[in-house]
Image (cartoon, coloured by chain):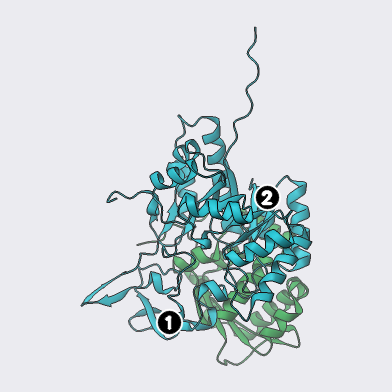
Chain colours: A green, B cyan
């Protein structure tokens, strides 16, 4: 059965270019963004539970793989591939929809639009902690950007 | 002479789930009458990492809800064991001290303690109490003073109607959400695979026992090493509980317990209102704020429509589309409410 949730993918050339770019700069930018927007909102005990673990976020249509680790309660980029505790796979639009609270993560998961591989307990901890965090300004910016980009297609 | 203004029709109360403070706020903002939540431990049946409320967030949640006319209920809906009684007892004290509007309790011993130690605390009988007859509900009312009972999802509409007609207690029924196997409060199925039961540890499938694995044959979900299901590219996975598992039985592969479906009773609302249902419960404390926002918005509108004119109430396609978009599985069912074989 095909998903009924609207889908939007980046144009194929974006992914082709993304796959040729070095991965570290994007991971550095992403980890910096996490530290600026989320780190202070993450409870210390949660960061301690995540300490030392590596996470990989695959943005399929952008050809990108963002890798970072939690070290000393900070998000730090990871250059070389180590076995991550969690690997997420989705397209950029779905990640943006999740971050903007426009989509429900379980629904994306049920529809195979969000693939999560690895430690389920840590995945739940991350998901539930993100659900607890209110970042209305960042979400507002994301929502506006998504509206400018136009509606997703069903 | 002008007719006197009619009192506004009273809608059934809408009882919505909250696993996090943002979900609570969205439930209240979108029209929940009651919001139910749990502590961060096994005293509730959604004991998952990172979910639920500490004392500070409950106090803030109660303040927010009360300012907007909503109430906060705390689910203490698991069963204490001989060695853990004090933890559940302390949870009742904690809920009372925090000033919650009611506690939702399953265990008779805990109800007795709450009634004695906190006579002012409003008590609701949890669905996990598994009281399916008016005699059972009246027993809880007479002995512990329960004010509301949540009916287990095993009764047909006709059976629920008979219970409501014969009990002095408010009756709450499930309206929407994931369905679990129909032995609420008595299910120990997952303990065979994980060593933990939902009624004592607060989760059907403890996350530490779950493995999702991509194999050449498809996406596999395992619980305690037991293969629950294997999904092809076009399949939609559900929550990895044994009761939703697809197993080989006598050479046939199917769901021997139940298919992963969601309950959706929108079309029954006029009937439920007419028979005196006091409150409609939405399942899903483990779900995101987006889910809570969507379900609450749809159900508020539906309940108000039904209260305004029961006879002309029609389920709007937009409601069904919104709910289908966030349901587990791709089927909605009336569950036991509709039982043609009865």
Residue lying at the far top in this picture: please name it: B1
Instruction: Where is residue A73? Give x, y as percent.
Output: 75, 84
- Dot 2 alpha-carbon crowd within 10 angstroms: few under 14, some 14 to 19, many 20 or more: many
- Marker count (numbered): 2
Residue lying at the far left in this picture: please name it: B251
Element under disc 1: helix
Left or right, residue A147 beside residue A116: right
Give the chain of mark 2: B
Residue under the image location 64 percent in, 50 percent down: B34
Q: What residue sits right under mark 2 in the picture?
A: B28
Badge number at residue B214: none
Residue under the image location 39 percent in, 44 percent down: B158
Left or right, residue B188 beside residue B300: left
Instruction: Where is residue B135? Give x, y as percent.
Output: 48, 51
Q: Which of B336 and B298 is in front in this view?
A: B336
Q: Is residue B272 above or below residue A107?
A: above
Q: Can residue B50 be seen in this view?
A: yes
Element under disc 2: helix
Q: What residue sits right under mark 1 in the picture?
A: B192
CA gap between label 2 and label 1 equals: 39 Å
Instruction: Where is residue B90? Give x, y as percent.
Output: 72, 71
């Amino acid at each position: 059965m095909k998903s009924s949730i609207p889908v939007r993918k980046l144009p194929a050339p974006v992914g082709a270019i993304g796959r040729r770019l070095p991965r570290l700069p994007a991971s550095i930018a992403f980890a910096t963004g996490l530290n600026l927007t989320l780190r202070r909102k993450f409870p210390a005990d949660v960061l301690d539970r995540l300490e030392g673990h590596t996470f990989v976020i695959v943005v399929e249509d952008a050809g990108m793989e963002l890798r970072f680790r939690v070290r000393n309660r900070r998000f730090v980029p990871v250059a070389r591939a180590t076995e991550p505790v969690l690997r997420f796979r989705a397209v950029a639009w779905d990640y943006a929809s999740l971050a903007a609270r426009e989509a429900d993560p379980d629904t994306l998961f049920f529809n195979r639009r969000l693939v999560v591989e690895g430690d389920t307990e840590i995945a739940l901890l991350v998901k539930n902690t993100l659900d607890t965090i209110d970042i209305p300004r960042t979400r507002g910016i994301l929502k506006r950007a998504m509206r400018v980009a136009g509606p997703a297609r069903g | 002479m002008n007719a006197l203004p009619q009192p506004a029709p009273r809608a059934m109360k809408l009882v919505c789930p909250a696993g996090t403070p943002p979900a609570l706020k969205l439930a209240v903002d979108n029209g929940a009458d009651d919001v139910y939540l749990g502590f961060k431990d096994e005293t509730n049946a959604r004991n998952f990492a990172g979910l639920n409320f500490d004392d500070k967030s409950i106090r803030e949640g109660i303040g927010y809800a009360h300012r907007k006319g909503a109430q906060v209920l705390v689910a203490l809906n698991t069963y204490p064991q001989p060695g853990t009684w004090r933890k559940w007892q302390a949870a009742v004290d904690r809920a009372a001290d925090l000033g919650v509007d009611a506690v939702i309790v399953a265990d008779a011993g805990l109800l007795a303690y709450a009634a004695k130690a906190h006579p002012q605390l409003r008590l609701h009988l949890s669905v996990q109490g598994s009281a399916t007859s008016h005699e059972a509900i009246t027993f809880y009312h007479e002995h512990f003073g329960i004010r509301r009972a949540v009916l287990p999802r095993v009764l047909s509409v006709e059976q629920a109607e008979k219970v409501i007609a014969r009990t002095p207690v408010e009756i709450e029924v499930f309206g929407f959400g994931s369905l679990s196997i129909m032995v609420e409060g008595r299910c120990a199925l997952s303990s065979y695979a994980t060593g933990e039961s939902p009624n004592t540890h607060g989760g059907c499938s403890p996350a530490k026992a779950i493995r999702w694995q991509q194999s050449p044959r498809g996406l596999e979900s395992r619980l305690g090493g037991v293969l629950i299901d294997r999904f092809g590219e076009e399949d939609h996975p559900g929550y990895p509980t044994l009761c939703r598992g697809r197993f080989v039985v006598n050479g046939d592969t199917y769901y021997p317990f139940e298919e992963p479906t969601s309950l959706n009773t929108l079309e029954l609302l006029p009937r439920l209102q007419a028979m005196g249902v006091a409150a409609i419960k939405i399942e899903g404390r483990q779900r995101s704020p987006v889910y809570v926002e969507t379900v609450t918005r749809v159900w508020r509108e539906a309940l108000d429509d039904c209260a305004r004119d029961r006879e002309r109430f029609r389920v709007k396609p937009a409601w069904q589309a919104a709910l289908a978009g966030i349901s587990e599985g791709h089927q909605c069912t009336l569950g036991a409410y509709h039982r043609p074989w009865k």
